[in-house]
Image (tube, helix red, strand yellow):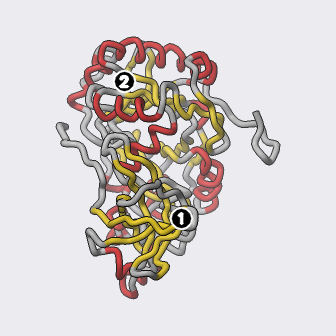
Amino acid sequence: MATPAGLTLKRTALYEAHRAAGARMVEFGGWEMPLEYTGIMQEHLAVRTRAGLFDVSHMGEIELRGSGALALLQYVTSNDVARLAVGQAQYTALMYPQGSAVDDCLVHRLAEDHYLLCVNAANTEKDFEWITRHNSWGASVRDVSHEYSQLALQGPRAAAILARLTDADLGAIKYYCFRPATCCGVGGLLARTGYTGEDGFEFYFPPSESERVWSALLDAGKPDGLLPAGLGARNTLRLEAAYPLYGHELDEETTLLEAGLGWICKFDKGEFLGRAALLAEQQHGLRKKLVGFEMLGRGIARDGYPVWIGGEPAGRVTSGSYAPFLRRNIGLAYVLPSEAAVAGREIAVEIRGQRVAARLVPLPFYKRTAKS
């Protein structure tokens, strides 16, 4: 299979397992990945009510080591990496000087001077080049993506399923923490993180062990209704939770403040790329603001559809879908800041030339009851 540009798509170590399971494969970020197995609806509901297992080995991993690693990360990311203890992870963004994101990512502190970044698949090379370009501190920076497979076990029964197959004390791994662990007889890093809005774990381990771990987890989870889940459910789950997706809610033209990510901008840590632009934006105001909406009329709002408020063009949709758990059509959009704060405000989304009624609603659309 090839991309339109004629480049061969990458495949994870589980490609054959996905095909054997009857997965529908699609191109995503330069990779050939499973979109769905039994259906997006079923996989989505499995994650919300039981558990789902995702192959996310297409994600990139970048390692930073050395005495200059912390200073480099503090400069190129928006959050405060110095706040991390060893064994903690942090959501952050690699920054452009204009206050927008090169990428959003996770930083894991493995040791005092050793960090592991998990970045978006399509941005791995760009991210690595950007970090290397700004490395004035002599840190060792390596793209180690080939050293890892990554599986995400997500859902309210994820911990119970994983407990049968790991030596880790899962109760001791708090949200956004990780530790070295053995899972299914394979050593790796086990993190309590995810992209679905549910409790769950992400396991980083050698690609050569991929089918062993994948099969063992699926077998162990059968009594609990665990299903393999693809990119389709991953997208609808993150949309219900109002998590941003790079290339949709985040891009080179959108600042973190416009995207509602001011909480990962730690201005008091000192200078970082984009800091001055974001501070100026705080003073002078935003150009646009991210909002959530639900459709009142028939139809699904798709990416790029125009948004109208009071009969005037007011923005565009960034993500839209039917939400299987909430059972309604929802979406995210950028609109004029003056319109963004009015919860319940009726708007219209232009769908194939017709303006269809919708209304603004608070975010996130879905939030689980935390138990850990």
Asked whether residue 265 is in view, the answer is no
Residue at the spot of label 2: 181
In this view, 41 is above or below 300: above
Q: Secondary structure at mark 1?
A: loop
Give coordinates of residue 101: x percent, y percent: 51, 63
Residue at the spot of label 1: 305
* First along the sequence among labels 2 and 1: 2
Is 15 or 187 nearer to us in this picture? Answer: 15
Mark 1 surroundings: few (<14), some (14-19) or many (≥20) residues within 10 A? many
| Quadrant location of the C terminus in the rendered image | top left
Give coordinates of residue 81: x percent, y percent: 38, 55
| Residue at point 48%, 19% (across, down) | 214
Give coordinates of residue 154: x percent, y percent: 35, 32
Tell me the amino acid under the disc marked 1: Tyr
| Quadrant location of the N terminus in the rendered image | top right
In this view, 196 is above or below 104: above
In this view, 76 is above or below 89: below
